[in-house]
Image: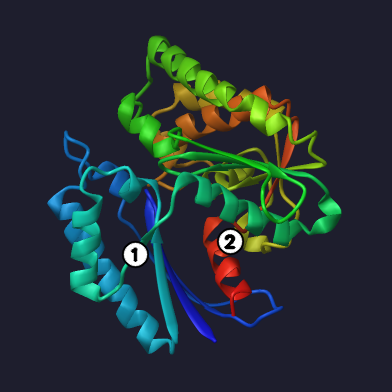
Amino acid sequence: MRLGVIDVGSNTVHLLVIDAHPGAHPLPDYSHKVDLRLAEQLTDDGAISPDGAERLARFVLDCVEVAESRGVSELLGFATSAIRDATNTDEVLDRVRAASGLQLQVLSGENEARLTFLAARRWFGWSSGRLFLIDIGGGSLELAAGIDEEADAVASLPLGAGRLTRELQLAGDNPSEKKLKELRKRIRSQIAEEHRPLVKVGAPHRVVGTSKTIRSLGRLCGAAPSSEGQHVPRTLARADLAAWVPKLAAMAPEDRSNLPGISQARGPQMLAGAMVVEAAMELFDVDQLDICPWALREGFILRRMDSL
């Protein structure tokens, strides 16, 4: 069957059309996306702004039309922390449904972690043994650990790169040392609260990182560019990342955007993202992680394929 999945994230809304067959890997056919940056479309009371909701509804309608033109037989859509944490979630979902006819499924943070873990497990296989997963998006940080396809322990924390950048006003030039210290303390204290349940699962045989932020940080630290294909092994070393954090802090966002692997849209968020990933690696004693090209979207697709 030809399956379409619309992923409404905090930064990007992405339609992926795939050919899905039981027992086979999902074969991408077409990709259609836009940087809506919903996490930045919030009013003072935490609601998605009317303009943000309208832009989302229009783009989802556009995705529905694109999916139909690509011969999609089933179209699904899900939303993550930007919609989940908004104070007007139901209003936004109703607006999208009225415009496009599509009912978005709002994933919990736990489900995000479990589906992303499934994607990493399928990508790296059983020979990888016990996995530990670090996944950072625009709105949240997901952590998961386990030996099977279902994670034995998961955590979802409000430590997304976009969220922290916005809340602590790190988008401007040269954040003060006070703000950086405040951010560092907040990140580490929240991750530390989830430390025990995750390490009780047992020492991992492989640590995996997913998401655009981690792929960008890997490229910044010397990993192969995306043009070489997704099957090229890529890693991110904590020592390399730690060396880049003070450099990123000293740069203006537009200068970060000129670095390898970092787009103009994500430049402002890379400092916060780097600090979160570095903290997670340090607190869980991870010297190096393997970068996985599959993440939440692929996990969602794989779960649907399993039900065929």
Spatial CA span between label 1 and label 2: 16 Å
Q: Estimate the x, y position of residue 159 in percent, counting from the top left.
A: 45, 33
Q: Earlier in the sequence, mark 1 or mark 2?
A: 1
Residue at 56%, 45% in the rendered image: 216
- Left or right of 139? Residue 89 is left
Q: Amino acid at mark 2?
A: Gly
Q: Quadrant of residue 132?
A: top right
Q: Amino acid at mark 1?
A: Leu
| Image vertical order of residue 27 relative to residue 90, above or below | below
Closest to the observer, 96 or 244: 96
| Image vertical order of residue 94 relative to residue 278, above or below | below
Q: Secondary structure at mark 2?
A: helix
Which quadrant would the C terminus be assigned to in this image? bottom right
Q: Which residue is mark 1?
A: 104
- Left or right of 281? Residue 19 is left
Q: Quadrant of residue 15?
A: bottom left
Residue at 50%, 27% in the rendered image: 248
How crowded pointer 1 is (Cα within 10 Å; few <14, some 14-19, many 20+) is rated as many
Q: Secondary structure at mark 1?
A: loop
Closest to the observer, 175 or 6: 6
Closest to the observer, 55 or 223: 55
Q: Estimate the x, y position of residue 105 in percent, counting from the top left.
A: 38, 62
Residue at 39%, 53% in the rendered image: 9
Residues at circles 1 and 2 in contact by the CB criterion of under 8 Å: no
Q: Which residue is mark 2?
A: 299
| Mark identifier at residue 121 | none
Closest to the observer, 23 or 11: 23
Which quadrant would the N terminus be assigned to in this image? bottom right
Q: Estimate the x, y position of residue 168 in percent, counting from the top left.
A: 34, 24
Which residue is situated farthest in the top direction here?
A: 178
Q: Estimate the x, y position of residue 64 in percent, counting from the top left.
A: 32, 78
Q: Is residue 129 visible?
A: yes
